[in-house]
Amino acid sequence: MFETLKPQPADKILALMQMYRDDPRADKIDLGVGVYKNAEGVTPVMRAIKAAEHKLWEEQTTKAYVGLAGDPAYSDAMIKLILGDAVARENIAAAATPGGTGAVRQAFELIQMANPKARVFVSDPTWPNHVSILKYVGIETVVYRYFDRDTRGVNFDGMMEDLKGAEKGDVVLLHGCCHNPTGANLNEVQWKEVIALLNERGLIPMIDIAYQGFGDGLEQDALGVRLVASSCPETLIAASCSKNFGIYRERTGLLMAVSNDTSAQALNQGTLAFLNRQNYSFPPDHGARLVTMILNDDALRTDWAAELEEVRLGMLGLRQQLADELQRLTGSDRFSFIAQHRGMFSLLGTTPDLVEKMRVDNGIYMVGDSRLNIAGLNAQTVPVLAKAIVDAGV
Ligand code: PMP
């Protein structure tokens, strides 16, 4: 049987990580993988997570199974964090999943179960895993214009025009905030226009929110998802705690199905539990428990939010420094988009050849599509990157 297997394409970002490790240059800079790093290049365990783990170790008396949808207290806490008061709790079904990826995968399976004819519209570009999981699950994917390669902002007219090609029942996948890989995001007016189009055409929004708190703040980053969930009849939301709680390997995510018809909640909840059962039975609990403890404890929550804010402001500072440095070197504002983008990533919008040139000449590792991880920089490496960008002729 095994002889029939075909080699699968290597994950480009993981392959890049390996090349970085193998590079002997001391001054190499890793702007590849999507993990937050502090100025020392470390992905720290957040203070509140450490404190919660300590408490959990002391207080936890059993590791028995929890429930197919995870602990309802986790869902409650996360729903509050993401949706605030935008939607009544009884309109939301939710289940814990292994990371945001698990939530995305389960959402796609739910779409396929509910409407096998639905196509999923994804932004050009989007997180590559969206596209590869859709293909694997067997859902037709349609790309909509999103990134304007001249301004490096959102090509909103192109996006709206392409979404008009969607038909009733199709799903539109949107990034809640901090778009990966571009860093370019919708503003409030644009969110409202998208919502009007979704409702006019009977399209179902699916929001992937993996960076709440990394852009403009915890509340501001939830603006889009709250507007959508409170204005559309049905919304799917895939959330990740990997970045904003720094618990990447604990695999902590949540899938929500929001309906303005309260009577749909029980059926949706049962479906989410069923999907968990089929795929991995009980979802991981450790990360979810830590998140719940932090969100429900005033002191832990305050400390977590403060540390998250330090992370966010640190990245914004690096963005500004890089944009300023490029302005100084080029005498033009053409890189000001770096300071306007939000989240961990910016798409430089240059060719794979120039990305490769910067890797070979300067030991700068960014993804081939020219996505750079701002958190891979620090005050000392920003000028090095800026010079490399200019030298390469980006
Ligand atoms: N969605 C997007 C857009 C992401 O960038 C990521 C992380 N790379 C995820 C979902 C899921 O992350 P995880 O499975 O690690 O929680």
Image: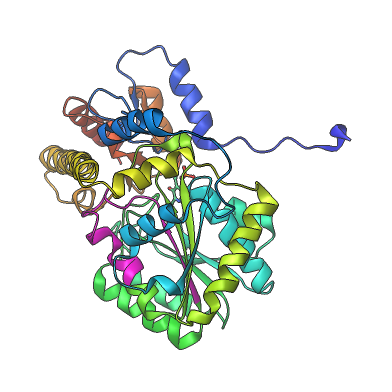
Give the left or right position of residue 50, taking residue 238 as reference.
left
- Quadrant of the image occupied by residue 372: top left
In front of the other: 79 or 190: 79
**Res. 128 visible in picture:** no
**Left or right: where does residue 47 sit relative to residue 94?**
left
- Up-down relation of residue 168 to residue 187 (above or below): below
Residue 235 in picture, x, y percent from top left:
47, 72
Compared with residue 322, is residue 258 higher up or lower down, i.e. above or below? Answer: below
Q: Does the magenta stretch include residue 213?
A: yes
Q: Quadrant of the N terminus?
A: top right
Q: What stretch is highlighted in magenta?
A: 204-226
- Residue 15 left/right relative to 209: right
Residue under the point 28% across and 66% down: 223
Residue 264, percent from left and from top: 54, 78
Does the magenta portion include 315? no
Quadrant of the rendered image containing residue 384: top left
Report how many numbered discs are placed on residues in the image.
Answer: 0
Picture quarter with the C terminus? top left
| Residue 258 on image: x %, y % | 46, 71
Q: Position of residue 51 (x, y in %)?
A: 29, 31
Q: Which residue lies furthest to the bottom in this view?
A: 200
Q: Residue furthest right?
A: 1
In-front residue for pair 66/178: 66
86 or 324, which lies in front?
86
Figure check: 109 above or below 16: below
Which quadrant holds residue 390?
A: top left
Q: Residue at x 33, y 23 (%)?
A: 362
- For the question of whether residue 77 can be seen, the reply is yes
